C-alpha cells in the first residue's frame, strides 16, 4: 500500500513541472499577441524566442501542440517582417521567411502561405533576382486557398492581398528583360488578379487601382510579348 502511494505521489509530482512550463508557454504566447497587436514588434519577437528556447531545452507537451507552435512561428515571422521594414536587411527578411515557412509546415494555413510567397517575392526584388517567380507562384496559391476557404467569396481582406500581390508583381516587369519569361508571367498574373477582383463590388478607390493595371498591361500587351520597350 505504501509503495502504491509513493508511486502515485511520484507520478503526480512528475507532472508538476510540465504543468508549470505549460502555463509559462501559454502566458508568453498571450504576451506575444498583446505586443504584436500593440505594434511592439521587438518585444513580440523576444517573447516568441523565449518560447522557442524553452521548447529547445525543456521540451514539454505544449511544444508539440501544433496550434501553439504554428502561432509562435507565425507571430515571429510577422514581427520580423515589420522590423525588416525599418532595417531593410536581407538577414532579417530571410529570418522572417524561415519562420513563416515553419509555421506553414505545421498547419498549412493559407494566410501564412500567401505571406511566405509574398516575402519570397520581396526578397527576389531586394536581391535583384526577378528571374525567380517562386514567390509569385506561392503567394498566388495562398490567395486561391484563401478564396476557397471563404467559400469562393472575395472578401475585403482578400482584395487587400490581391492589391499587394499586384504591386509586388509589377516590380517583376520593370525593366522588361529581353527574352525573359518572368516579366511576361508577372504581367499575366496581374491581369488574372484583376479578374479575380471583378468577382465582387469594390470601392471607387479600388476600382481606380485595378483599372490602372488593366490599362497598363493590356495596352502594352504586344510590345511586352515581343520584349520591346515602349
Image (tube, rainbow, N blue to C red):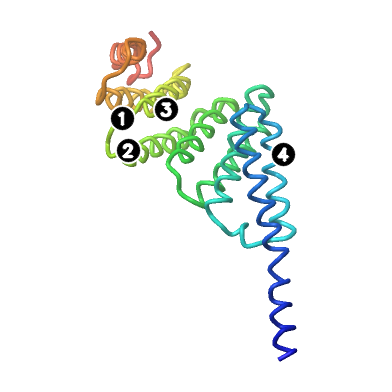
Q: Residue at x 74, y 89 (%)?
A: 3
Q: Considering the numbered disc 3 on the image, is that residue within a helix, a strand or a loop? A: helix
User: Of marks 4 and 3, which one's residue comes earlier in the chain?
Assistant: 4
Q: CA distance from mark 4 to mark 3?
A: 28 Å
Residues marked 2 and 1 touching at CB (< 8 Å): yes
Q: Nearer the viewer, residue 142 or 185?
A: 142
Q: Residue at x 54, y 46 (%)?
A: 103
Q: How many marks?
A: 4
Q: Give the percent coordinates (x, y) of residue 197.
A: 30, 24
Judging by the rendered image, the residue that carries numbered circle 4 is 46
Asked whether, in this view, residue 170 is left or right of residue 120, the answer is: left
Identify the mark nearer the N-term, 3 or 1. Answer: 1
Up-down relation of residue 200 to residue 16 (above or below): above
**Distance from the alpha carbon under mark 3 to that under mark 2:** 14 Å
For the residue pair 98 and 59, the one nearer the viewer reads as 59
- The local crowd at label 3, few if under 14, some if 14 to 19, many if 20 or more residues have their Cα within 10 Å, is many
Tell me the element at label 2: loop
In which quadrant is the N terminus drawn?
bottom right
Q: Earlier in the sequence, mark 2 or mark 4?
A: 4
Pointer 2: what residue? 150
Amino acid at each position: 500500500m505504501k509503495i502504491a502511494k509513493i508511486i502515485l505521489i511520484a507520478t503526480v509530482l512528475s507532472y508538476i513541472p510540465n504543468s508549470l512550463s505549460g502555463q509559462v508557454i501559454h502566458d508568453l504566447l498571450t504576451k506575444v499577441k498583446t505586443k504584436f497587436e500593440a505594434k511592439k514588434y521587438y518585444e513580440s519577437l523576444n517573447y516568441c524566442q523565449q518560447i522557442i528556447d524553452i521548447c529547445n531545452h525543456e521540451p514539454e507537451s505544449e511544444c508539440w501542440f501544433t496550434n501553439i507552435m504554428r502561432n509562435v512561428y507565425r507571430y515571429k515571422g510577422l514581427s520580423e517582417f515589420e522590423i525588416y521594414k525599418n532595417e531593410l536587411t536581407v538577414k532579417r527578411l530571410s529570418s522572417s521567411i524561415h519562420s513563416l515557412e515553419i509555421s506553414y509546415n505545421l498547419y498549412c494555413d493559407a494566410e501564412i502561405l500567401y505571406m511566405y510567397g509574398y516575402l519570397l517575392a520581396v526578397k527576389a526584388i531586394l536581391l535583384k533576382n526577378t528571374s525567380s517567380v517562386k514567390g509569385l507562384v506561392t503567394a498566388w496559391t495562398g490567395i486561391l486557398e484563401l478564396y476557397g476557404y471563404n467559400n469562393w467569396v472575395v472578401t475585403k481582406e482578400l482584395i487587400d492581398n490581391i492589391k499587394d500581390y499586384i504591386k509586388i508583381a509589377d516590380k517583376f516587369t520593370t525593366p522588361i528583360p529581353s527574352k525573359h519569361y518572368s516579366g511576361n508571367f508577372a504581367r499575366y498574373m496581374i491581369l488574372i488578379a484583376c479578374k479575380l477582383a471583378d468577382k465582387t463590388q469594390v470601392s471607387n478607390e479600388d476600382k481606380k487601382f485595378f483599372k490602372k493595371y488593366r490599362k497598363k498591361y493590356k495596352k502594352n500587351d504586344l510590345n511586352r510579348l515581343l520584349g520591346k520597350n515602349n
